[in-house]
Amino acid sequence: MLRKGSPLVGALMLMATSAMLGGCSGARGKDPESVLRAYGEALEDGRAEDAYRMLSEEARRGLSRESFLRLAKEHPDEVRDIGRSLRRPAHDAIVTAVATTTTGEEVRLVLEKGTW
């Protein structure tokens, strides 16, 4: 059963965002929505190894492969529910990024209609 307050839900949803951003930069021709669907499909199908490989380097630094696989193994029903929900988002994904200028100023970018 998917529980909104569950630490697993939070971790995997955060990983989903990371998968989108990591996938967009690493997978040529892949838009954020298709990367998110692929990540959700991997979770739903129980392919935790595949889902982990879709994560950005930053996300993998924050959660080891072993920890990710253990979470998926210990909570298979929640992981499937999360995967299912990610494959069918209620609305379009909002993709953002933060860029740091040479002066150290942070600029928030939002992807809208295919452009930043």
Image: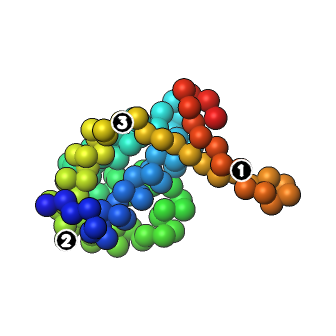
User: Which amino acid lies under the numbered mark 2 shown in the image of this protein?
Assistant: Glu
Residue drawn at x 73%, y 56% as measured from the top left: 106
As measured in the structure, the alpha-carbon distance from the residue carrying label 1 to the one carrying label 3 is 25 Å
Question: Quick one: label 1, few (<14), some, or many (20+) residues within 10 Å?
Answer: few
Q: Which residue is mark 2?
A: 74
Reply above or below: 104 against 26.
Answer: below
Looking at marks 1 and 2 on the same chain, the residue that comes earlier in the sequence is marked by 2
Q: Position of residue 81 (x, y in %)?
A: 19, 53
- Which residue is most to the top? 113
Instruction: Classify the position of the C terminus by image quarter.
Output: top right
Using the image as rendered, state which of residue 112 and residue 77 is in the foreground. Answer: 112
User: Which amino acid lies under the numbered mark 3 shown in the image of this protein?
Assistant: His
Labelled disc at residue 91? 3
Residue drawn at x 45%, y 51% as measured from the top left: 17
At numbered mark 2, what does the secondary structure look like: helix, strand or loop?
helix
Question: Quick one: label 2, few (<14), some, or many (20+) residues within 10 Å?
Answer: few
Q: How many marks?
A: 3
Looking at marks 1 and 3 on the same chain, the residue that comes earlier in the sequence is marked by 3
Looking at marks 3 and 2 on the same chain, the residue that comes earlier in the sequence is marked by 2
Reply above or below: 27 against 115.
Answer: below
